[in-house]
Amino acid sequence: MHLLEISFLMVKRELTARYRGTIFGYLWSFLNPMAFAAVYYIAFKYIVRIPVEDYSIFLLTGLFPWIWISASVISGTSSFENFQALLKTGYVKPIIIPLLVVFTELTHFLFAIPILLIMLFFSGLEINFLNYIFIPILMIFQTIFLISVVTIVGCLSLVYRDISHMVTILIQMLFFLSPIIYPLSLVPSNYLSIYKLNPLVNFFELWRQSFYIGNIDYSLLIYPTILIFILITIAYFVIKKIGDRAVEWM
Amino acid sequence: MDVKNSIIEINDLVKVYPRNKKKSIIELFKKKQQEDDSTDKRFYRKSAIDHVSFKIPKGSRFGIIGHNGSGKSTLLSLMLGILKPDKGTLKINGRPLGLLELGSGFHPDLTGKENIYLYSSILGNRIKETHNIISKVAEFSELGSSLDRSIRTYSSGMVVRLAFSVLAFIKSDILLIDEILGVGDFQFQLKCLNYFEEFSKNGGTIVFVSQDYKTILNFCNYCICLNKGKIISYGPVKKVVKVFREDMEKIKKQYVDEIF
């Protein structure tokens, strides 16, 4: 419980510090993804002409979870380095750092959900509100997934310098290799089995299904669940080996 | 020295820092072969703390003295749990509170008050408990209306003052102090000393790290002297400080001999 309380205060600190003294304050956290969405909308709706109805909603239901993922992993890679002052107090366990990183980005995601709901409401799409019960569950899945990933890359990048460069490239690749700006149906069927190795595919499909498509395919959760267990095991060993001695690597 | 009622027990403690600070990713795959020789070599290397054993009596004021790089601060970090021992044991029967790098946990963009909440929470307080102590912390710090300004506008002395004020209201059994008396103005130093006296009177143990034998002599009753990670003297403060001064004279003489 105390761990959660510290993360709450730290997230508050992060957000307050990040937006204090800026013109739009917290609004920046919406403006950034919205600006991206506008650019992608023009590029992929009018230039590439991806055949998706209600493309703006399609795009945002993919883009908001994506920003949560990419921002967490990118800031998570350098997080152990950035929060070394915190670890050097000697009172907090290293696991607080991934929690803090993922929760901060989760907060941004939570702020974005009302925008999505308003847009969905005005879009005239038929929405099954029962599906929204699934959103918090999906959120928990993705939170745990991200915490273990951030733990692993954050700890490893303390020791191995190449990690942060690799993560940057990987994130850029994953953006185009996940169904964010285009639907899964556009992926050629002979590549589909390889394409689906990317666990983010399942996440994005589930986000869209629960936000507006309906008919949630719960079997999509199997692959992420297995992966989460593997990642947690790795994260556990990484934190035992490196995380608990993080201060020595700084 | 025989200690019956000890609060910290250190037995054959070894601490070696990693050989390479940062590695390239290739070494992750090479690891298997490397590990075999590295485990052996590790302990041949110069250790920061080299087979150190001693006990700190409960309620004492324990000094740790030594030159630069003798391992004083490493030892303190080990007691605080920031570093983990490579060999040997370290047993602490109580809650330690570290007074080192004061103010490093603060966020410059937040106000003094916000930082008090944050820091106090990091140190293990629940938000409710911080509510109860915040007025006392504010009073103790004597920062007044500055507490509503962001830390960015503070002088370094004010930051230390604020950090110390929060620490002063955290319950603990052992204070670990790393030469913080060097910072802050005279008035604040007196306040710190008063607090230490009070803490000591109430049965608390104080571990004090310094290079300055005068402070140690005034303040402590027991002491160890470290040199290159090894204990060269251990016992009542007068005896240890004498050893330290002799050692200092020796080094001085060496320098003088080298120069002239």
Image: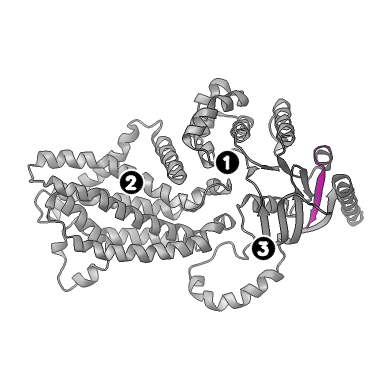
Badge 1: few (under 14), some or many (20 or more) residues near its Cα, within 10 Å?
A: some
| Chain to which the residue tagged by mark 1 belongs | B
The Cα atoms of the two marked residues, 2 and 3, are separated by: 39 Å
Q: How many marks?
A: 3
Q: Are marks 1 and 2 on the same chain?
A: no
The Cα atoms of the two marked residues, 3 and 1, are separated by: 25 Å
The three-letter code of the residue at mark 3 reads Val
Question: Which quarter of the image is occupied by the C terminus of chain B?
Answer: bottom right
Q: Position of residue A41 (x, y in %)?
A: 17, 48
A138, A50: nearer the viewer? A138
The numbered mark at residue B16 is 3
Left or right of B65 in this view: B76: left
Which residue is at 66% across, 75% downward? Answer: B40
Q: Position of residue B6 (x, y in %)?
A: 74, 50
B75, B93: nearer the viewer? B93
Residue carrying label 2: A106
Residue carrying label 1: B104
